[in-house]
Image (spheres, coloured by chain):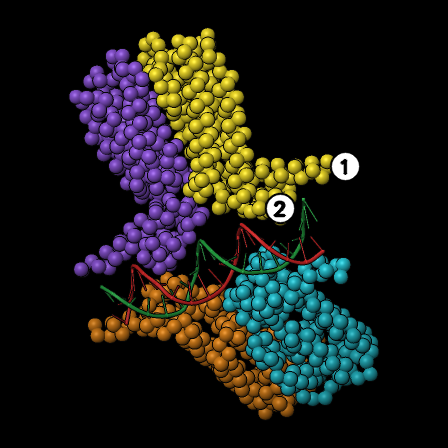
Chain colours: A yellow, B purple, C cyan, D orange, E green, F red
DNA sequence: AATGAATGAGTTTTCATTCAT
DNA sequence: CATGAATGAAAACTCATTCAT
């Protein structure tokens, strides 16, 4: 009994966040009206105000929450990568594919689109969230690559640079192909970007001369 | 003098387009009100409607025009690249820097931001313009790289892939750093991306083992 | 007190309808701006949109409501007419005067003017409402006249025709005189139309040769 | 050569009037925009201002002109009626049918609709034109009926009343059926109204007891 | 805490009218 | 005189936000 009230409240809180992420990502901040969010969430409009203060507060909460989720998934993916793999190429391809999927698939796409589209409207919020997430991701990735270098699987002097370039090689093309999150990505484009990206990465950073393109 | 009637109209047309590019890029489509565009352009609001029909028509005209401009600049830059350079690394760095500048600097940044932010609102328009431009750019770049391969400066089997990866290596980081066009790019980031990007590109595609990273 | 919430809403609904009938009838649909309706009704403009969707929806509601009112009054008037009167002429004059009053006086005039002026703008709505009402009125009137014929007070073979012609005789002149609802009717014109209309009606349909004109 | 300028001007004047009658009648004053009138007339918008001053002036000119035309046609019809006909019923039916046609057919309908719909907007103009026309028509008709009484074809003491009632009997139903000019009239309705209207008129005003209805 | 209802402020669009040629 | 272009004023409609229950 006692927790029911709390549970309900938490449920509504979460329902509003989910609905808002969906609607904001599809229509952008300015074109989102809270009536629609309220309807999708199944609550009355004033309830949104009770929970989040105003429209900007709701948006901030959505961005923070969804970014944390995405970041956690990315960290998991990187952590799951072996530092001493049998097949380096396969290991990197798996890693890259997972990263691209975190950033472009499902909620990841919505999260990214939000950050991207509303960067000019909420500069501090978005800068903080995005740069923070990106920095953490690149740090983790650089760490992993440094370990691979330590174990002799890679030959690199600047793990940060290698991390940035690996990300660029495998994620740039899918990003553009998705219309920067506006459309679903073509899986074939992801495949090609991952395969060719890792290939070039290895050509540049593998200890032995890798096969040419 | 004699053509003043025509001149005046053309002037206003151009003034509206310039003002609209500025305001749209800064505030996004939904947050732009035509009162502000009219004021910046120095015309009355109905004049905008006379020239462009409605807000969406104005936006479309802005995107088309500014994209054509950007595309022309990019084509010039690529065309100006030597296919038999003394110093390949320097030549590629110059090319890359110019490309990044076309895409991220000044009007280029505004153009890109428009396309990127409003992709979901005007899918056909943006797809047509952006994909068209990107494809043309990559074709031109691939052609240039193929020539460099033919003259023995590069070793590559798939010029299209090389073009996409060169673009990714040098432009991804500045793009992110600019908040996808929301902030001015840090020139140091551009420098680093260009230098390191070309370096890795050469490591992967130069005939002789390129210098390590 | 307990039902204040409901009451308030109903009050505003009614207030808007009343105000709108007034303003629409005076100025016509196109010249009516909802700011004025809102002011007359004592509500904010969006409240009108909350209740009626848009301007056309408000108009439709006004027409439906006011027509139902008018129709009910007309039905009452006809029902109140005796089928076995002592003085047939007096009875018919009373009936006719009441009918004309229903159609031309006060809210009746506004209702009629609306239907008449906006017939081209809302063809289905107006056709439905007006033809329906007119048909029902003529049916009721024809029924009453048929009863008067059955009791020997009138001599007629086609009660529908008699009803139409009675209406024409007593209402045409006041209608024109009011500028089709634009001005208040001159009571003297109503008097004359009723007296002379009933007189001619009786000359044509009374069993015994009625007094000459 | 010399008259060409004048001729052209007259042509344009007339073309504007014709176009304006058409558009005003279809859409009403408030919903008519002069761009459309200009396009239909094949002239530039300022030309309308040169000829008629402003929108209201154009409307007044249209009403005056078209009313004069309609009035002239009505006068012709009444004048063409014999005062000593072989078949009185047939003669009256012909007269009535022609009158209804003048008022409801083609330009007559447009003229009437204008007067009716815009009565509240231009009270003096419309009152003057309509009442004037109606009075003249009723005077002419009353004169004709008085002559028929003088020749023993009718038995009436008040020719004005007889004229008003004849008009009411034959024109009321078609008027309503046309939606007061908004739709084309059903010819069957005209036929019935004329036949039955004249029948009742004769029942009331013929010297010998006319056949009952 | 949650909600139905109400509202103030703002935006797109239209159109009668006027310049300048 | 006729016209292409420009404009000031207004009106429909929307939406974030707040009351009152």
Measured along the vertical axis of the image, is residue D12 above or below residue A32? Answer: below
Q: Nearer the viewer, residue C173 or C208?
A: C173
What chain letter is assigned to the residue under label 2? A
Q: Do the residues labelled 1 and 2 touch (CB within 8 Å)?
A: no
- Residue A1 numbered tag: 1
> What residue sits right under mark 2 in the picture?
A50
Q: Which of B54 and C169 is in front in this view?
A: B54
Horizontal arrangement in the rendering, residue D36 relative to residue C4 (left or right)? left
Q: Residue at x 42, y 42 (%)?
A: A120
Alpha carbon of mark 1 to alpha carbon of mark 2: how far? 22 Å
Q: Is residue B169 visible?
A: yes
Q: At which x and y percent is residue D100?
A: 55, 74
Where is residue C112, by image quadrant? Answer: bottom right
Q: Nearer the viewer, residue C97 or D78?
A: C97
- Residue A114 numbered tag: none
Position of the N terminus of chain A by quadrant: top right
């Amino acid at each position: 009994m006692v927790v029911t009230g709390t549970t309900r409240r938490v449920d509504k809180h979460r329902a509003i966040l989910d609905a808002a992420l969906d609607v904001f990502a599809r229509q952008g901040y300015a074109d989102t009206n809270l009536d629609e969010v309220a309807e999708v969430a199944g609550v009355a409009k004033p309830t949104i105000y009770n929970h989040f203060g105003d429209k900007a507060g709701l948006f901030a909460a959505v961005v923070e929450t969804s970014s944390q989720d995405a970041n956690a998934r990315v960290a998991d993916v990187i952590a799951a990568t072996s530092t001493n793999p049998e097949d380096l190429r396969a290991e990197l391809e798996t890693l890259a594919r997972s990263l691209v999927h975190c950033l472009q698939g499902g909620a990841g796409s919505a999260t990214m689109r939000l950050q991207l589209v509303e960067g000019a409207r909420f500069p501090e919020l978005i800068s903080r969230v995005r740069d923070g997430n990106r920095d953490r991701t690149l740090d983790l990735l650089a760490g992993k690559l440094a370990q691979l270098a330590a174990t002799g699987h890679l030959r690199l002097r600047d793990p940060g640079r290698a991390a940035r370039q690996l990300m660029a090689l495998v994620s740039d093309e899918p990003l553009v192909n998705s219309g920067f999150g506006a459309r679903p990505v073509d899986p074939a484009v992801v495949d090609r970007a991952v395969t060719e990206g890792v290939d070039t990465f290895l050509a540049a950073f593998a200890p032995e001369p890798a096969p040419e393109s």
